[in-house]
Image (cartoon, grey):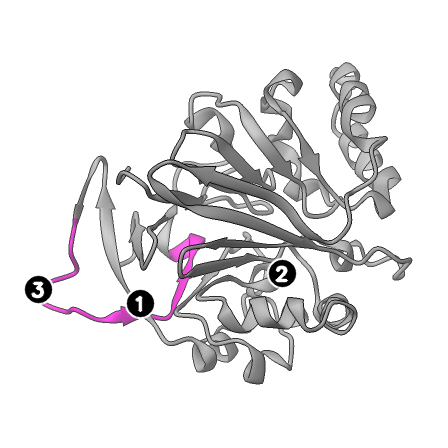
Amino acid sequence: MTRGALELIVWDVREGSAATLILPDGRVVWFDCGKGSFINGENFLPYKSLKSPIIDLLVLSHPHKNHLKDFWNIPSSNINDCLFNSTVSNEYMDALRSFSENRGDIAETFAKRFIMKPSPYCGIIRAYKFPFAPPLTLFGYWVDDYFGDNFNNYSVVVFLSTGKNIVCLTGDIEEEGFDFLLTKHTPFFDELLRKTNIFLALHHGNKKGWFSKFSSLLRPEITIISENEGKETDALSFYENITAGHIVQKEIKDSTEWLFPPVFKKNKILTTKANGTIKIVLTEKEFSLFATRGL
């Protein structure tokens, strides 16, 4: 990794989503725990592919099983802290217990360490400083009132702000929940959204997650979709209309090659199904994009 850079990996998963932020000092922030791969099959486990790192902060966006499946491969002692929407704590526990027949001790350990702790207030959730890199601030927002039984709308939305880059990770929140956050947390939420240059699309690129106000609020350079098997990704044209585009390199093992020749073009949309695991290297003034296939 480039000295002083942060590296965000959006994993090729077939279920849910999973993303890993590797900090310049080696610490890790993990977002959601989907599993499987469109190339490597159902047995692909993102956490094990990084040689079991210590996670400084684990963000579980919402209590749907497909976003929690790789959780069981993370020893509870390897998680320093966890952020989730404590408004739906019981639903997280129900989801964890539902596929943990022989691992109830892990569910109970998780409950004692994290579930019983309420989420912090919306806003700044973490701030990191490094000797040779720009500081990183994590902002988190979530619906903290009862909002019906659609747990997608309780998804934690996280902004990563470092140097001139702002990344937005959205979980599976849908338009109603996003509008709630925008209304309640204006002007801070919409200011972050307007400055976002790397956007991870709502609800796997599904129209249910398309927010009509994006047309006036959001102008990213790249939109990334964690695409799920068997689910419609039918909002691509909407995102293409608001995304400027950014050059993408192809990653081959431990080296890279530019998309040149014959075509040197900007990509607007990257999806995990078409483009595999996507890596974003963030420096103070810019970012670079790499994908494992489909370029």
Residue 157 is situated, as x and y percent measured from the top left of the image, at 65, 56
Helix, strand, or loop for circle 1?
A: strand
Residue marked by disc 1: 246
**What residue sits 82% from the left and 33% below the top?**
117
Evaluate whether residue 158 shows in this view: yes
Decide: marks 3, 2 in contact (CB < 8 A)? Answer: no
> Could you say which quadrant of the image residue 258 lies in?
bottom left
Residue 257 is situated, as x and y percent measured from the top left of the image, at 15, 50
Residue type for callout 3: Pro
**What residue sits 64% from the left and 81% below the top?**
212
Q: Residues within 10 Å of mark 2 (few under 14, many from 20)?
A: many
Decide: marks 2, 1 in contact (CB < 8 A)? Answer: no
Q: Earlier in the sequence, mark 2 or mark 1?
A: 2
Front residue (pair 41, 131): 131
> Could you say which quadrant of the image residue 34 lies in?
top right
In 3D space, how far apart are the residues under numbered discs 1 and 3 (Cα atoms)? 17 Å
User: Which mark is on residue 261?
Assistant: 3
Residue marked by disc 2: 203
Q: Residues within 10 Å of mark 3 (few under 14, many from 20)?
A: few
Q: Earlier in the sequence, mark 3 or mark 2?
A: 2
Find out whether residue 263 is within the magenta segment.
yes
Q: Earlier in the sequence, mark 1 or mark 3?
A: 1
Q: Please tell me whether residue 186 is drawn above or below residue 86 in the rendered image.
A: below
Relative to residue 87, is residue 45 drawn left or right? left
